[in-house]
């Protein structure tokens, strides 16, 4: 039985819905809202998110991460990513985290995460965690290059509400710990293309080959080129060539 949970049949986006709700209500931590359909679902930096009505998990959760320093806010992304992988691993293995926080199976995307942090003075006031997880959708009609769903992977449908319940449990387990070392280790363990040399591309369409050297605490991706040159990138400053 889900507590602190609200279901709405349709909304613009669950992140927007939750932000508006916060303006008039005091909501408990881990409050979650789920919808069957979003009219304006967004991914990172305004990318759209395709989801057939009622087929997938479209939800947002509220956190008050006052204990997490602003400069370490990437740990929130790591917590959510690992929680999703652990949840999916109950059905099938082989899921990975594509930096910074997309969830992949092979070279196909099963989940996107949109984290919006509200800062007040020197701390994170609240975080809204938006999750779009493909569960039972079989046909994707948008121009998204590589979507996949859990049902396509395991060959059967799964209860969306059950997935949400499992996911909230996983998020709580990781979020409430005071030891971030295992979280960071697991993030690296599940990192998409974490080992080996691969092609990357900058916004200027420069393509180069490199390996992932490390991930900084602020989420910065550190790459080592084939010529052993170390380069650092923040989100949207570089992308994988798939």
Image (cartoon, rainbow, N blue to C red):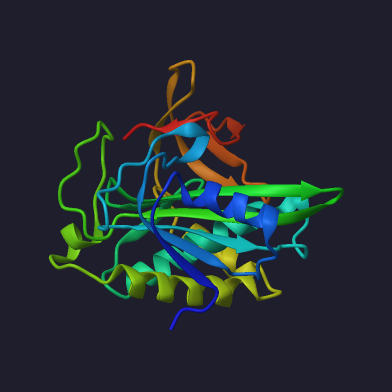
| Residue 82, above or below 128 | below
Q: Position of residue 208 (x, y in %)?
A: 43, 25
Viewer-nearest residue: 20 or 72: 20
Residue drawn at the location 34% of the way across and 75% of the way down: 162
x and y, in percent, of residue 170 in the image: 49, 74
Depth check: 205 or 1 in front? 1
Q: Is residue 54 left or right of residue 220?
A: left
Furthest residue in direction front, as rendered = 24
Q: Residue at x 66, y 56 (%)?
A: 22
In the image: residue 120, left or right of residue 179: right
Q: Quadrant of residue 79?
A: bottom right
Which image quadrant: the N terminus?
bottom left
Quarter holding the C terminus? top left
In terms of image quadrants, where is residue 161? bottom left
237 relative position to 28: left or right:
left
- Please provide percent x and percent y for residue 200: 42, 30
Q: Nearer the viewer, residue 160 or 115?
A: 160
How far across and how far down the image is residue 198, in percent?
38, 37
Is 8 drawn above or below residue 206 in the view shown? below
On screen, residue 149 above or below 87 = above
Q: Number of labelled discs?
A: 0
Q: Which residue is farthest right?
A: 121
């Amino acid at each position: 039985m889900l507590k602190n949970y609200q279901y709405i049949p349709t909304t613009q986006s669950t992140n927007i819905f939750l932000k508006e709700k916060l303006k008039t209500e005091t909501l408990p931590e881990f409050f979650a809202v789920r919808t069957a359909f979003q009219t304006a679902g967004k991914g990172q930096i305004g990318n759209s998110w395709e989801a057939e009505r009622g087929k997938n998990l479209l939800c947002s959760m509220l956190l008050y991460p006052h204990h997490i320093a602003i400069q370490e806010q990437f740990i929130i992304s790591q917590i959510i990513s690992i929680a999703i992988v652990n949840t999916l691993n109950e059905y099938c293995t082989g899921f990975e985290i594509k930096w910074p926080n997309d969830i992949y199976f092979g070279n196909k995307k099963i989940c996107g995460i949109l984290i919006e942090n509200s800062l007040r003075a020197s701390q994170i006031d609240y975080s809204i965690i938006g999750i779009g997880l493909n569960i039972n959708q079989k046909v994707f009609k948008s121009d998204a290059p590589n979507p996949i769903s859990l049902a396509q992977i395991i060959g059967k449908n799964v209860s969306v509400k059950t997935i949400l319940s499992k996911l909230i449990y996983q998020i709580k387990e990781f979020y409430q710990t005071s030891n971030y070392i295992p979280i960071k280790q697991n993030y690296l363990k599940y990192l998409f293309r974490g080992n080996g040399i691969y092609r990357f591309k900058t916004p200027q369409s420069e393509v180069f080959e490199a390996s992932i050297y490390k991930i900084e605490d602020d989420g910065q991706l550190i790459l080592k080129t084939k010529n052993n040159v170390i380069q650092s990138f923040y989100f949207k400053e570089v992308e994988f060539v798939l």
